Image (spheres, rainbow, N blue to C red):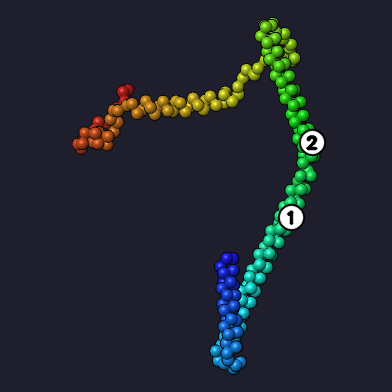
Amino acid sequence: SQLEDDVIRDLRVRLQELRMKESELSGLYTEKNQELVRIRKQIEDVRGMIAGEIQTQIDMNKNQLAIILQRESALRDLVGRVTAEKELYPQRTVELERIDAELSKLQKTYDDVVDQDMAAKISVASNPEWAVTILDPASKAARKKTRDYVRMALGPFFSLIVALGLAFFIDNLDHSIKNVSEAEETLGMSVLSSFPDTEGK
C-alpha cells in the first residue's frame, strides 16, 4: 500500500542520513567512539526495520498472489463450464428448431379443426332437418307390483299412533272438574260433602 511504501522510503532516507553521519564521524574519531558506535547501532536497527517491512510486503504479496491464483482457478473452471455449454449450443439450436416445427404443425392442425368445427356449425344451422337413428329400441311393457306390503304392514301401526294422539288431544280440551281434589284446588275451598254417583236404572 501507499502507507507502507512511504514507511520504507522514510526508513531509507533515515538510513542514508545515518550513513552520511557515520562517514563524517569515522573520519574524525576512532572506532571506539561512543557517538560512532551509537550511530552504527541505529544503522543496524534501521536496516532491521527496513528488512522487516520488506518481509511484511513480501508476505502480503504472497497472500495476494495466492488469492489471485484461487480466483484464476475459479475463472478457469468458469471458462471451462461456459465452453462446455457453448459446445452444446448447436445441439440445443437443432432441438429448438425441431420443437418450433412441431409447434407450427400443431398450430396448423388446430386451425384446421377450428375451421371444420365452424363449417359444421354453419352446415347444421343452414339445414334444420334432423336424421334420427334409434340405437336401442324400447323393451316390452311389464306390469308393476300393485301391492305394497310394507305400507300395508305399517298402516295399522301409524293409525293407532294417530288415534292415541287424537284421544289425548280431545282429553286435554275437556276442562270440567272430575274429582274432589280438583274442586278444592280450583275453588281454593274445602269440600264439605259430595254426592255419590248414581246410575239410572
Instruction: Write down the quadrant of residue 10 in the picture.
Output: bottom right
Q: Position of residue 154 (x, y in %)?
A: 55, 26
Q: Which residue is rendered at x = 70% and y = 13% of the image?
A: 119
Give left or right: position of 176 versus 159. left
| Quadrant of the snapshot with the C terminus | top left
* Residue type, mark 2 in image: Val
How far apart marks 2 and 1 lie (CA) works out to 28 Å
* Residue type, mark 1 in image: Arg
Give left or right: position of 142 versus 183. right
Q: Position of residue 196 (x, y in %)?
A: 27, 31
Pointer 1 local density, CA inside 10 Å: few below 14, some 14–19, many at least 20 = few
Q: Which residue is rendered at x = 67% and y = 6% of the image?
A: 126
Up/down of 105 relative to 146, above or below: below
Q: Which residue is rendered at x = 53% and y = 24% of the image?
A: 155
Does dot 2 land on a helix, a strand or a loop?
helix
User: Would you name the residue on which mark 2 appears?
Assistant: 94
User: Would you name the residue on which mark 1 appears?
Assistant: 76
Residue 64 visible within the image: yes
Q: Position of residue 101 (x, y in %)?
A: 77, 29
| Closer to the camera in the image, 165 or 25 | 25
Disc with the residue nearer the chain's start (2 vs 1):
1
Mark 2, mark 1: which one is toward the viewer?
Answer: 1
Does dot 1 land on a helix, a strand or a loop?
helix
| Closer to the camera in the image, 79 or 64 | 64
Up/down of 201 relative to 82, above or below: above
Q: Which mark is residue 61?
A: none
| Closer to the camera in the image, 36 or 67 | 36
Q: Position of residue 164 (x, y in %)?
A: 44, 28
Instruction: Write down the quadrant of residue 193 in the picture.
Output: top left
Up/down of 98 relative to 71, above or below: above
| Closer to the camera in the image, 63 or 200 | 63
